[in-house]
Amino acid sequence: MTVPELRPWRTAGPHVARAASAVRPRLARFARTAKPRVARFARATGPQLARITGPKTWQYTAGAATAGLALAAGVVTAAGPWDSTGQRTAERDRAVALEQTGGTDHGSGSGASGTSSGSPRPAPSAGAVLTGLGGTTTPGGVKAAPGGKDLAGLLDPLLKDDPALGEHRAAAVVDLTTGKRLYGLGGDAPLIPASTTKIATAVAALTALGPDHRLTTRTALEADTGELVLVGGGDPTLTARKDPRGLASLRTLAEKTAAALKKRDVRKVTLSYDTTLYAGTEMHPIGVNDNLARVTALMADEGRTDDSTSGPAPRVPDPAADAARTFAGLLKEHGVTASAPGPSKATARADTLATVSSPPLSALVERMLTNSDNDLAEALARHTAVATGKRADFDGAGAAVTARLGQLGLPVQGARFHDGSGLDRTDLISADLLTALLAEAADPARPQLRAVLTGLPVAHFTGTLAGRYTDGAAGLVRAKTGTLTGVNTLAGTVTTPDGHLLGFAFLANATTDPWTAQTTLDRAATALASPRA
């Protein structure tokens, strides 16, 4: 079939053309000498990397890259592994050296919690291009990737002919350095995207709010009544845990609030909580579910009832009330007694006593994509609505995301966004739109979108891909996964052996065997990383 090309994209900067296989002996030597660093890395990244053991990951991560960050295979020997946010340590160090702002948090932790006295310092961000060692340094130095019959021969047997992908399927592959379409299979047909919806949510939120935006939770004192209001800022990563790990801390907010109250000689307050930043129903259409909490502007630790930080978990029935009760207990630890909290709304006359702020939006986007965080996805969709003047409910958030993508000139025909996470089975996205979103994020003219690519899980390394790609494409594929009953999707980037960076989107609906369908999609992505691609 004839497949229309995406609109032209500017060259995404210098990429390398060395195949990973050329330096595998060097990587083997590096693996033997880097064991202490590997151990520290494993401890830092926590449960999401628990399955990563042995040297195979090191063998293949040499080729791992994202648009604007396509490193030479040999750079691993000098730069070390990915850090806990999915960034290269080399990129982090370069970012700090250049003292740039406007991007990822890089797990710095410092400055993640703001105070009423000033805004947090923006996090450092690496430049649009991190040139590989020995690689070209001139724009346009990368030849166009092959396509047409070459890719059709690789992908058709999997994506077109394999019955595991069910009745409805679509695919698209583009060269991210040029925007040229290399492969298409029903690319303009809107299908149920599942969690690949989060790519659209990420692009919309970053363009509406900017990568440095932070979500702020505050306390306000009503001067006339003495009522203390805990005002939710729509930050689901707000934490009540003793170690905030760089997130906004409810404990810090309580400590600062108590100190401010004591300066006013106040030791007893009537406590209320304000969730009016959001509108409409809090319950997602899927109902009570371990995959997300009620969608509210105030919650702590995503309303989880266990010690988990990602993945499914039982949630409290009312996250806002639960967070307020926790806050009251924390105030008591600092000598301030609070009444049993109830819902209210802070007035414009209320004095702000203290604030805490989330990591920058770029870091939140990375967390959302890496862990497929549904609570964070719904929050970012709501904030997109707030920033663009839409009603902050499910309908308004969907309209805001659609509008933002349309303003970018992306192919939104037939797209439907009824939530930000992709849990709603009435969402619809085409493979063309998903690859266009990836190409947009790869455009050097839009550095604010780079977190969309750096946040993608790394095959056999991070997030929802940590347990997949045990061979061949480990470290080479970075992709957002999507799984619902009868739905399997995958969209992301892959580095070819000769240094080309491709964007791809594979969608399968009406699948009957989710494991087999997932395996087929993984094989298709692996095929793109093969020497024949």
Image: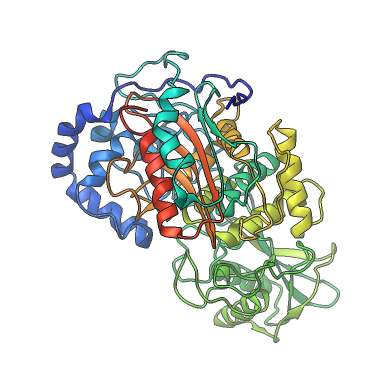
Closest to the observer, 151 or 198: 151
Residue shown at 56%/34% (left/top)?
441
Closest to the observer, 392 or 363: 392
x, y percent for residue 18: 29, 23
Residue 411 sits in quarter: top right
Q: How many marks?
A: 0
Work out which quarter of the rendered image holds the C terminus and state it.
top left
Residue shown at 54%/63% (left/top)?
485
Left or right, residue 404 beside residue 533: right
Residue 342 sits in quarter: bottom right
Can I make out residue 147 in this image? Answer: no
Closest to the observer, 330 or 75: 75
Can I make out residue 356 in this image? Answer: yes
Residue shown at 37%/16% (left/top)?
136
Left or right, residue 11 beside residue 232: left
Residue shown at 42%/15% (left/top)?
143
x, y percent for residue 46: 35, 60
Question: Is residue 210 placed above or below 338 in the rendered structure?
Answer: above
